[in-house]
Amino acid sequence: MKRIVVLTSGGDAPGMNPAIRAVVRSAIYHGMEVYGAYHGYHGLMNGDLLRMDLGSVGDIIHRGGTMLYSARSEEFKTAAGRERAMEVCHQHGIEGLVVIGGDGSFRGAHALAELGLHTVGIPGTIDNDIAGTDFTIGFHTAVNTVLDAIDKIRDTATSHERTYVIETMGRNAGDIALWAGLAGGAETIIIPEKQEPFEQIIERLLHGHKRGKKHSIIIVAEGVGKGDDFAKRIQEETGFETRVTVLGYIQRGGSPTAYDRVLASRLGGYAVQLLMEGKSDVMVGIQQNQLMVTPFLQSFEDVHQIDDSMYELAKILSI
Ligand code: ADP
């Protein structure tokens, strides 16, 4: 493998930059040439490429977002779009692709592998919703951002003795809510993987109030519905003054945490190593702190699981 291309695709996540840096520097170290495609698959289809050297990825390890920009491309989902991407690769002598993104981006990489390009995926999304890895790049940073918000809201919640509902991102996955909720000492965590009867949530809030709790913090993952709707129902059923904070896109930004930078660096280096070994149509991941390879097809079939014991523990600790 002499020449590869790296791109970031789908929703951005803090840690994509250190992942790009790791791919570029490892590849050059091993004697390869590297291109970066701007705006994900859109740039690959249109030949919007940057020839990258060691200096191209200088001073980005601490920056959120992605220096290569990210995008969603409908055209790339068509066979004609993917043929165009393959043509660009042939024209430039590109034999391998590293894509940093989520499930959708991996489906694109799988489709290109079927056309003969060597592809490796690096899981980059704040949602932590990819099977084949315990953690995706960006998840830890997002959890810390949510935690910072919970701590601040806790101050005002205590002062006013109110109930607060905080809506987090995560698409259909509850990991951001679960981790931030446990770390932030939330009274209740509502996630798609574990639907607790609403009466039980109300019961717990009333019980806490009776034993003298001055406030309650309820974390709602976006995958179960709107924080506003939960707040309305809670106020109706308990009579407690309830306020809502929808955290939104702040969860996707910010300087990546040490963990995300280390994860991004390890996965980036590993992705290049796999391409050198001739591997393709696979994603890299981390399981129990070991670097792992999973075929894309298997990662599409499997479902990322939340840790049930963490959910149960959060309930126990919030009595
Ligand atoms: P993410 O990678 O974060 O899950 P998306 O699902 O939006 O984000 O996917 C990013 C891009 O990957 C899409 O805009 C599209 O170009 C490509 N893609 C998604 N699904 C497929 C698919 N089934 N086949 C080919 N390309 C796909």
Image (cartoon, grey):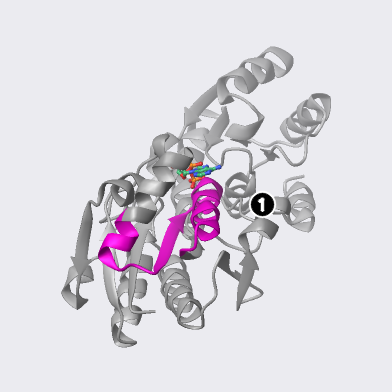
| Residue lying at 29% horizontally and 48% vertically, measured from the top left | 43
Using the rendered image of the protein, determine whether residue 210 is visible from the camera's viewpoint.
yes
Query: Dot 1 corresponds to which residue?
Result: 300
In the displayed structure, 314 sits above or below 93; it is above
Residue 198, image quadrant: top right
Residue range of the region highlighted in magenta in the rendering: 88-117
- In the rendered image, residue 24 lying in the magenta stretch gets the answer no
How many marks on residues? 1
Residue 155 against residue 142 in the figure, above or below: above
Mark 1 burial class by Cα count in 10 Å: few <14, some 14-19, many 20+: some
Viewer-proximal residue, 285 or 210?
285
Q: Which residue sits furthest top?
A: 236
Report the amino acid beneath label 1: Phe
The answer to whether 208 appears left or right of 105 in the picture is right
Residue at 66% across, 52% down: 300
- Residue 5: image location, x then y, percent: 33, 65
Q: Quadrant of residue 255?
A: bottom left
Looking at the picture, how far across and down is residue 94, in whole percent?
33, 67
Residue 11 visible (yes or no): no
